[in-house]
Amino acid sequence: MKAIQIATYNKNIIRALLGLKTVEKSAGSPGDDEVLVKMHAAPCNPSDIAFIQGTYNIVKSLPAVPGFEGAGTVVETGKNTGHLLGKKVSAFVQRDTDGTWAEFFVVHRDDLIVLKDEMDPDQAACFTVNPFTAYGLMEIALLRESKAVVQNAAGGQVAAFVRLMAAENGMEVINIVRKKESVDVLRQAGARHVLYENDEDFEQQLRGLCAELQATTAFDAVGGPLAGTIFNSLVPDAELVIYGGLSGKPVENLDVMGPIFQNKIISGFNLIDWKNELDAEDFEKISGFLQDKFIGGTYKTKIQGSTTLDKIVKGLRGYIANMSAGKILIRP
Ligand SMILES: NC(=O)c1ccc[n+]([C@@H]2O[C@H](COP(=O)([O-])OP(=O)(O)OC[C@H]3O[C@@H](n4cnc5c(N)ncnc54)[C@H](OP(=O)(O)O)[C@@H]3O)[C@@H](O)[C@H]2O)c1
């Protein structure tokens, strides 16, 4: 089969992209608890970019096929997976095996979701990561009975799902973006509170809104000084949940008075850990709930275009230049 492979990690993003090579290799055959999936499409997420740079939590043995997420059809099964033959599935592959950026990929049965028939195949390619992440984040805000949440990287897809779920729960969202043009895009899409992080009075606006709307939960995907500013702007008893590090920088600016005298806390969220804490029945229920939202058309991942395995470098450069425009799908 044809696959994308990296031979080394490279922190420099241009070099990391240029290190993506198209190779011919065996599709492999599934072990007892695995299946072989014929890939329909796979997205590129920020975690995939961090992976090829060698800056992500998951480090695989090299050479490796990147791609943590994707969808397709099961074409071969193992001893314990015969019931999955022919099923349409979405997969999340973070084990030390080849990933999804290939014509075929092998996946453990615990790492896939069997899809309802009506699920759109392109939407299925982006189903296992962001919708569940937003769901898990919203559970935190709901448990805290927050009336409002703050989020940065608000033009991204996790943030878009957070907005939808917050609206369904009567919760306000204070959205923060890094590009001026994203303010209008989000407002036109119906977001009420959108702040541009480089405005001179950004911090003042953020503090004002947090107090007015009583924002007691914030979701940070960026880190760096912005994370500290958000934390400092939250009202007492609030929680900042860190779930991404898009700036590549450690959290800065944190006012120590918050944790000491205002009972503010910082926590982290990781999808895999969240999933592992759920029992299988609860996960199935959440998966069914989310799939119905997609099938009904309420939830949708924004997809800006697609590329092929052969043209992956060009395709991914387009995504990195404008991530808020939506995902790029890699097709075999
Ligand atoms: N912890 C978990 O389990 C988990 C699970 C899923 C996702 N995540 C994380 O969630 C974050 C968002 O993922 P996604 O798939 O929603 O992203 P996405 O749809 O690809 O969009 C990324 C968004 O982040 C913005 N952005 C990129 N770099 C930034 C920076 N340095 N400062 C501020 N904003 C920046 C982009 O804005 P521009 O358009 O201006 O570039 C874009 O709006 C990522 O960090 C990802 O790794 C974590």
Image: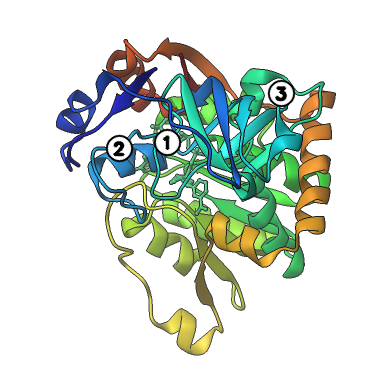
Which amino acid type corresponds to the residue marked 1 in the rendered image? Answer: Gly
The answer to whether 144 is drawn above or below residue 118 in the figure is below
How packed is label 3: few (under 14 Cα within 10 Å), some, or many (20 or more)? some
Q: In which quarter of the image is ligand 1?
A: top left
Cα distance in 3D space between marks 2 and 3: 26 Å
The answer to which of 264 and 330 lies nearer the viewer is: 330
Q: How many marks?
A: 3
Labels 3, 1: front one = 3
Which amino acid type corresponds to the residue marked 3 in the rendered image? Answer: Gly
Label whose residue precedes the other's in the sequence (3 or 1): 3
Q: Badges 2 and 1: C-beta atoms under 8 Å apart?
A: yes
In this rendering, would 58 be left or right of 93? Answer: left
Badge 2 element: loop
Labels 2, 3: front one = 3
In the picture, the disc for residue 256 is none
The answer to whether 182 is drawn above or below residue 252 in the figure is above
How packed is label 2: few (under 14 Cα within 10 Å), some, or many (20 or more)? some
In the picture, the disc for residue 86 is 3
Instruction: Give the residue drawn at x 56%, y 55%.
Output: 271
The answer to which of 42 and 202 lies nearer the viewer is: 42
Instruction: Look at mark 1 in the image and give the residue it sits on.
Output: 99
Which amino acid type corresponds to the residue marked 2 in the rendered image? Answer: Ala
Image position, residue 199 (x, y; %): 39, 42
Instruction: Give the residue drawn at x 68%, y 46%.
Output: 80
Asked whether mark 1 lies closer than 8 Å to ligand 1, one says no
